[in-house]
């Protein structure tokens, strides 16, 4: 796996994509471009060239500047409404010509480094519902909340724009209920659940396959092929944190330690720890997160019991599992699931 990912300082994000959308939002609010781009290493002329790549660190600095200068409760939501299908050539065209929401979401996941480079969406399906789960991709830190609000607003706006209807999205967010709840009602809907164990959007599965009126299967297929070729030309197709999360899910039953993971990623434990610290995280945090998400998947989608989840994750007994689960979430499994199902 060595070297097959991008990191916070890798220039891999098209400046004329999401960064440009945020710049335009700020310029339309009368913000000076020099103040907005301070500390990013960018000039507006660089963005206008159409071939400039920026790093996640540069984008995080731009977001930080924009949030301070805009100083408005709806900034993330307004930014998100500009993002999908977006201005990114073939990838955006493939989205805009998709047959239905399921195809669009599958493209969003596959082309995430082009369409949503700072987050990693994951689509899960059970018999009744679709779940779109959002992960930190690059160590966003205090910018993550802005990004996940924008991401959810982007998907909801896209589904309404291309599908021609308002869908019954249910929203789960890890952060506490904000004081500006009205903005959430306007942009995300009223089925909102805060202090959840993950950042997730849920929708009845039947909504995924309703035909979209602008669908063009042949053109969408060609655009998708062109977008995949563009993705392969980037310095890497996924981030270090994305690669680690997916590796941890694949190896969750073995509960691998830091040394095992570092070896799989072709580096020493000390180097691996240093790289994770650069991304505002540590191995234990990533390991716990992956096991929590797998446990929730087994509970909610597979219908496993406490004992079955504990056995799958190879805990010595259910008591040890419940103790770990409470450390991960602050609640026992039964209490958390009861709260989530009762909402």
Image (cartoon, helix red, strand yellow):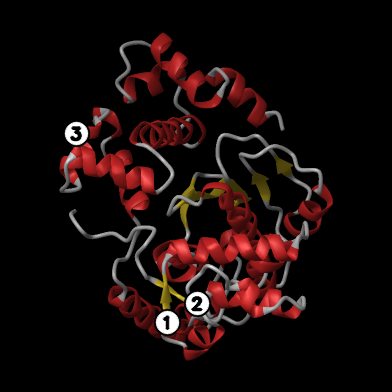
Residue 242 falls left or right of residue 158:
left
Up-down relation of residue 303 to residue 15 (above or below): above
Q: Residue at x 73, y 44 (%)?
A: 192
Q: Give the spatial CA distance, label 3 vs label 1.
A: 37 Å
Count of picture labels: 3
At mark 3, the secondary structure is helix
Q: Position of residue 121 (x, y in %)?
A: 48, 55
Q: Quadrant of residue 21?
A: bottom right
Q: Are marks 2 and 3 in contact (CB under 8 Å)?
A: no
User: 41 or 176, which is in the foreground?
Assistant: 41
Q: Give the spatial CA distance, label 2 vs label 3.
A: 38 Å
Ranked by sequence position, the earlier of labels 3 and 1 is: 1
Ranked by sequence position, the earlier of labels 2 and 3 is: 2
Q: Are marks 1 and 2 in contact (CB under 8 Å)?
A: yes
At mark 1, the secondary structure is loop
Between disc 2 and disc 3, the foreground one is: 2
The tag on residue 52 is: 1
Mark 3 highlights which residue?
Answer: 259
């Amino acid at each position: 796996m060595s070297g097959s990912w991008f990191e916070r300082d890798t220039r891999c994000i098209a400046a004329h994509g999401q960064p440009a959308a945020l710049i335009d939002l700020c310029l339309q609010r009368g913000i000076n471009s020099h103040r907005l781009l301070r500390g990013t290493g960018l000039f507006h002329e660089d963005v206008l060239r159409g071939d400039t790549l920026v790093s996640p660190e540069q984008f995080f600095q731009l977001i930080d500047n924009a949030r301070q200068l805009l100083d408005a409760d709806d900034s993330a939501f307004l930014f998100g409404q500009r993002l999908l299908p977006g201005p990114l050539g073939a990838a955006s065209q493939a989205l805009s010509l998709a047959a239905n929401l399921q195809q669009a979401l599958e493209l969003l996941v596959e082309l995430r480094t082009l369409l949503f480079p700072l987050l990693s969406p994951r689509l899960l399906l059970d018999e009744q519902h679709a779940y779109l789960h959002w992960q930190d991709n690059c160590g966003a830190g205090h910018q993550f909340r802005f990004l996940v609000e924008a991401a959810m607003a982007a998907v909801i706006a896209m589904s309404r724009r291309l599908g021609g209807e308002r869908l019954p999205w249910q929203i789960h967010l890890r952060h506490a209920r904000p004081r500006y709840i009205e903005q959430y009602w306007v942009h995300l809907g009223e089925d909102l659940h805060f202090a959840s164990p993950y950042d997730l959007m849920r929708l009845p599965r039947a909504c995924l396959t309703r035909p979209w009126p602008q669908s063009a299967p042949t053109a969408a297929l060609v655009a998708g092929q062109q977008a995949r070729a563009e993705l392969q030309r980037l310095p890497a197709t996924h981030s270090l944190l994305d690669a680690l999360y997916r590796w941890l899910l694949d190896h969750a039953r073995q509960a691998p330690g830091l040394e095992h993971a570092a070896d799989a990623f072709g580096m020493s434990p000390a180097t691996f720890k240093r790289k994770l610290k650069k991304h505002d995280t540590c191995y234990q945090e990533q390991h716990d997160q992956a096991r929590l998400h797998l446990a929730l998947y087994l509970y909610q989608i597979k219908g496993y019991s406490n004992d079955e989840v504990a056995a799958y994750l190879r805990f010595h007994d259910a008591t040890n599992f419940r103790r770990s689960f409470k450390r991960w979430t602050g609640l026992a499994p039964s209490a958390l699931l009861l709260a989530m199902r009762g909402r």
